Image (tube, rainbow, N blue to C red):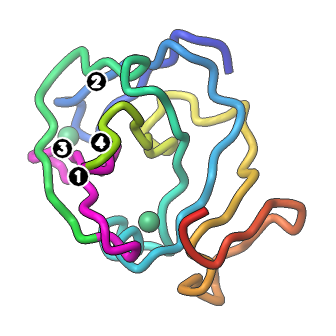
Amino acid sequence: MTPPLTGGCLCGAIRYTVSVPITEARACHCTSCQQASGAAGAVNAVLPSSALVITQGQPKRYASKADSGRTLYRYFCGDCGSPIYSQRETSPETSVLRVGTLDLPEGFRVTAHIWTKSARSWHHMEPDAKRFEGQP
Ligand SMILES: [Zn+2]
Ligand SMILES: [Zn+2]
């Protein structure tokens, strides 16, 4: 996909733009992402925070203790609950965007699976993607 990309939450209260191309995504199988998504985990693109601009609304922030032991800030829509992105407490210059919130979530490949040690048996993993048992 070529920038600028746009996306937002389910109810439309939160909208954002991304000013860099997204060519790769990674699937996170950690137990926090399973709970936060209510599904098998999350599929994310790692971006410089400067490339992600919230153009409408104000996401709520939840400080979550990640499986790595670090604090992860999870940003989501307080109205509809859509997870939008996350940032590590120690590296706010990097944002991890939930690619399913893009208006057109295509044009990239899942190239890595992380926290595979807690992956559920019913979640497909691309055979040619890299796999990491924990945080790479
Ligand atoms: Zn919403
Ligand atoms: Zn995770």
Residue, disc 4: 10
Disc 3 is placed on an element classified as: loop
Where's residue 38, x and y in %? 35, 72
Are the two marked residues, 1 and 3, in contact with CB atoms closer than 8 angstroms?
Answer: no
Q: Is mark 3 within 8 Å of ligand 1?
A: yes
Q: Amino acid at mark 1?
A: Tyr
Residue 112 part of the magenta-drawn span: no
Work out which quarter of the rendered image holds the N terminus and state it: top right
- Callout 1: SS: strand
Which of the two discs, 1 and 4, sits closer to the camera?
1
Q: Nearer the viewer, mark 1 or mark 2?
A: 1
Label 3–label 4 contact, CB within 8 A:
yes
Q: Residue furthest right?
A: 128
User: Residue 73: which disc?
Assistant: 1
Q: In the image, ligand 2 is in what quadrant?
A: bottom left
Look at mark 2 in the image and give the residue it sits on: 15
Distance, label 3 to label 2, CA atoms, is 10 Å
Provide the residue span drawn in magenta.
66-89
Q: Ligand 1 near label 4 (Cβ, under 8 Å)?
A: yes
Residue at 33% across / 22% down in the picture?
Answer: 16
Of mark 3 and mark 4, the one earlier in the sequence is: 4
Q: Is residue 69 above or below residue 20?
A: below
The amino acid marked with disc number 2 is Arg
Q: CA distance from mark 2 to mark 4?
A: 10 Å
Mark identifier at residue 43: none
Per the image, label 4 sits on a secondary structure element best described as loop
Which one is nearer the viewer's eye here, 98 or 10? 98
- Above or below: residue 71 compared with residue 105: below
Disc 3 residue crowd, few under 14, some 14–19, many 20+, Cα 10 Å: many
Q: Measure the C-alpha gap from mark 1 to mark 2.
A: 18 Å
Query: Taking 38 as reference, is 6 above or below it?
Result: above
